[in-house]
Image: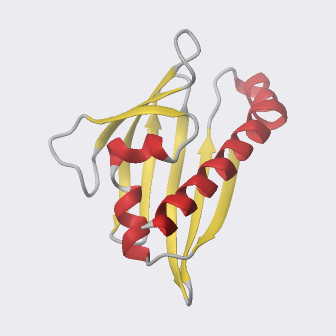
Amino acid sequence: MARIEASIRIQAPIERVWDILVDWEGQPRWMVDVRRVSVLSPHRTGPDVLLRCQMGVRRPLSVTDDMITTEWYEHSTVGVRHLGKLIRGYGAFDLEPTPTGTRFVWWEEVDPPLGPLGDLVTETIVAPVVTRMFHASLRRLKALCEAG
């Protein structure tokens, strides 16, 4: 299982960062690889929110990432479990108040397909690319949160 993590300090109140974070359909505004997010469950907050995330540039290069929220601590943490065949594992957004705003941490622990070969490809090729995308996304989130 590979772990990917990125963090950033945002000069905005934790409530603002949280509101932008859980605006599911608005996530493509700051996530560089996300094209669309849909809520498939009848509820939008708390545990067991079912989400479908369309990622990638376009078909056939797009991937659907179905996930369900597993943790929900208002203004602190939202955790998910990825349910797909290609993208499996766990991840979370963790928020922490700071004297000047919010510290935001995004981590994912992915369980790639294909056993040891998938682990090797993920560690050497996928993880560095995804880490760069996380950092680019967090810079966009920071700009979005600080603009308001």
* Scheme by which the image is coloured: secondary structure
Q: Is residue 83 visible?
A: yes
Nearer to me, 79 or 99: 99
Q: Position of residue 132 (x, y in %)?
A: 74, 45
Report the quarter where the N terminus lies: top right
Residue projecting furthest to the left: 42
Q: Position of residue 140 (x, y in %)?
A: 58, 53
Report the quarter where the C terminus lies: bottom left
Q: How many marks?
A: 0
Residue 148 to residue 48: above or below: below
Residue 24 to residue 95: above or below: above
Q: Residue at x 49, y 59 (%)?
A: 144
Nearer to me, 94 or 8: 8
Q: Is residue 81 visible?
A: no
Nearer to me, 86 or 16: 16
Residue projecting furthest to the right: 124
Residue 109 to residue 86: above or below: below
Q: Position of residue 76 (x, y in %)?
A: 42, 71
Q: Residue at x 57, y 22 (%)?
A: 57
The reply, left or right, for residue 147 in relation to residue 10 is left
Residue projecting furthest to the bottom: 99
Q: Residue at x 75, y 37 (%)?
A: 129
Residue projecting furthest to the front: 147
Q: Position of residue 18 (x, y in %)?
A: 39, 66
Q: Residue at x 21, y 39 (%)?
A: 41
The reply, left or right, for residue 113 in relation to residue 97 is right
